[in-house]
Image: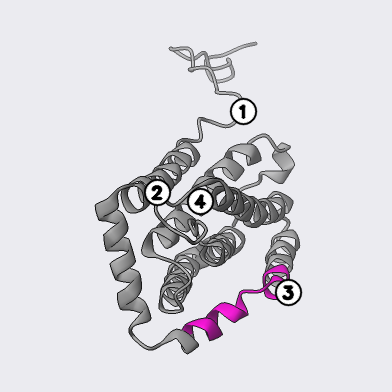
Amino acid sequence: MTTIATAPTVPLLDAPPRRRGPGTPVAAVLAVVLGAAAVVGAYVLAVLDPAGRALDDAVLRAATGLGLRGEGLTLLEIVGVPTVALAVAVLAGTAIARGRAGRAVGVVALVLGAQLVTQLLKAGLVRPDAAEDNSLPSGHVTLVASLGLALVLVVPRLLRPVAALAAVAVTGVAGVATMVAGWHRPSDVVAAVGVVVATAGVVSLAGSLLPARWRRRSA
């Protein structure tokens, strides 16, 4: 006999349909837009515009005039192929050890993808009225910034604020080192960070296409 207590509950209103699949990755799209805007802005304002180019060069002269070229070169020598390869291996291995295979793929894609974009831009863009080759964006800053962001992606959630602060600090040091060494202008540093941010957005969008078991939320 069915009573009120044993009768199945009938909802008064139909529940809204559940969305299938991941939602719109607004943050990833925003990262692509902001990163690309940083690259374009740095090139237009500090390379193509004569006044901006003069200011960019003035900052570079001031940085090289500090007399810290040796220290800057010493720091930049650390960012070599063996060091970067080891760092990528450690970060990807950490992600795999935590059961985050998708993050491991993302680390490799972020570092390699950002560097590829940087080298293509450096080869394709031109610097008006200059005898030297185009230096925008900075390859060294791209490597350091991408490794820093990869660190944020693979560490546990509680450690991400600390990792983010460390990534910003190390990227800043690398940017200053390239300027005091006379290798890059401020616009090159800004463009490199923009490349990394945009690449991270693209990698995040691509990651949403991975199998669900690879896209588990990190603890």
CA–CA distance in space, label 2 to label 1:
38 Å
Badge 1 marks a residue whose secondary structure is loop
Residue numbers of the magenta segment: 72-85
Secondary structure mostly seen in the magenta stretch: helix
CA–CA distance in space, label 3 to label 2:
31 Å
Question: Which quarter of the rendering shows the C terminus?
Answer: bottom right
Q: Which disc is residue 21 wearing?
A: 1
Q: Tell me: 83 left or right of 165.
A: right
Q: Residues within 10 Å of mark 1 (few under 14, many from 20)?
A: few
Q: Position of residue 59 (x, y in %)?
A: 30, 69
For marks 2 and 4, the one nearer the N-term is 2
**Three-letter amino acid code of the residue under disc 1:** Gly
Which residue sits at x=55%, y=22%? 18
Q: Residues within 10 Å of mark 3 (few under 14, many from 20)?
A: few
Q: Residues within 10 Å of mark 4 (few under 14, many from 20)?
A: many
Note whether 30 is above or below 182 in the view shown: above
Q: Is residue 121 magenta?
A: no
Q: Position of residue 145 (x, y in %)?
A: 52, 63
Badge 3 marks a residue whose secondary structure is helix
Q: Which residue is mark 2?
A: 43
Q: Position of residue 41 (x, y in %)?
A: 36, 46
Q: Which residue is mark 3?
A: 82
Of discs 2 and 4, which sits in the foreground? 2
**Three-letter amino acid code of the residue under disc 3:** Pro
Which residue sits at x=55%, y=53%? 122
**Three-letter amino acid code of the residue under disc 4:** Val
Q: Is residue 80 magenta?
A: yes
Question: Which quarter of the rendering shows the N terminus?
Answer: top right
Q: Are marks 1 and 4 in contact (CB under 8 Å)?
A: no
- The image quadrant of residue 173 is bottom left
